């Protein structure tokens, strides 16, 4: 199973592609889709749409796993990220790829066994689980790989299709 994990964002969208077969995880690729500040919203969303479509076309995933949004302060940022997240979901839907959502708590639990793990613990576990030499950068890409790993561990149990 090829899984595209996505850490949604507006300026930076983390993307991590993992392969899960016979109870083994393999990192295929990771990176980030970036958009520049002071660019029109429609242009930024268009860039995100085009770039994620390229990822989907290249890797032909069996599933897309997306982190659910969690915001506690800036409403303007929340709206922008929600718009970008919508673009990501529409892209997957247009390609016919099943989408699964996971909360930050579910992701942390799946990766570290502890729902309140900090960023450093998460990054170290992503590195270890994927047998990498270094922690993936940017942080958004490491987060996206974590979402993909979470789906690999959760598929068929407590995952929820969008």
Image: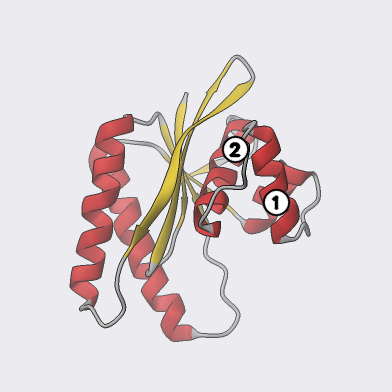
Instruction: Identify the image quadrant of residue 25.
Output: top right
Secondary structure, mark 1, is helix
Instruction: Identify the image quadrant of residue 129.
Output: top right
Task: Check residue 2 in the rendering and tell me which mark sits there, or answer none.
Answer: none
In three-dimensional space, the C-alpha distance between marks 2 and 1, rounded to whole angstroms, equals 11 Å
Count how many numbered circles sit on residues in the image. Answer: 2
The residue positioned 70% from the left and 51% from the top of the image is 122
| Left-right relation of 24 to 59 | right
The answer to whether 123 is drawn above or below residue 152 in the figure is below
Q: Position of residue 152 (x, y in %)?
A: 58, 32
Q: Residues within 10 Å of mark 1 (few under 14, many from 20)?
A: many
Residue 140 or residue 3, whichever sits in front: 140
Residue at label 1?
A: 122
The answer to whether 122 is drawn above or below residue 20 in the figure is below
Secondary structure, mark 2, is helix
Q: Position of residue 39 (x, y in %)?
A: 23, 78
Q: Position of residue 42 (x, y in %)?
A: 19, 72
| Left-right relation of 124 to 7 | right
Which residue is at the far front?
A: 133
The residue positioned 41% from the left and 59% from the top of the image is 13
The answer to whether 133 is drawn above or below residue 140 in the figure is above
Residue at label 2?
A: 149
């Amino acid at each position: 199973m090829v899984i595209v994990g996505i850490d949604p964002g507006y300026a930076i969208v983390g993307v991590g592609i993992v392969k899960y077969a016979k109870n083994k995880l393999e990192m295929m690729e990771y990176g980030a889709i970036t958009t520049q500040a002071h660019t029109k919203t429609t242009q930024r969303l268009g860039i995100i749409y085009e770039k994620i479509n390229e990822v989907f076309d290249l890797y032909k995933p069996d599933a897309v796993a997306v982190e659910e949004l969690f915001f506690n302060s800036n409403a303007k940022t929340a709206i922008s990220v929600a718009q970008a997240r919508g673009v990501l979901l529409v892209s997957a839907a247009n390609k016919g790829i099943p989408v699964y959502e996971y909360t930050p708590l579910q992701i942390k639990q799946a990766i570290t066994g502890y729902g309140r793990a900090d960023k450093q613990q998460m990054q170290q576990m992503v590195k270890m689980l994927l047998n990498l030499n270094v922690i993936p950068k940017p942080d958004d890409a490491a987060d996206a790989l974590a979402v993909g790993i979470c789906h690999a561990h959760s598929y068929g149990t407590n995952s929820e299709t969008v």
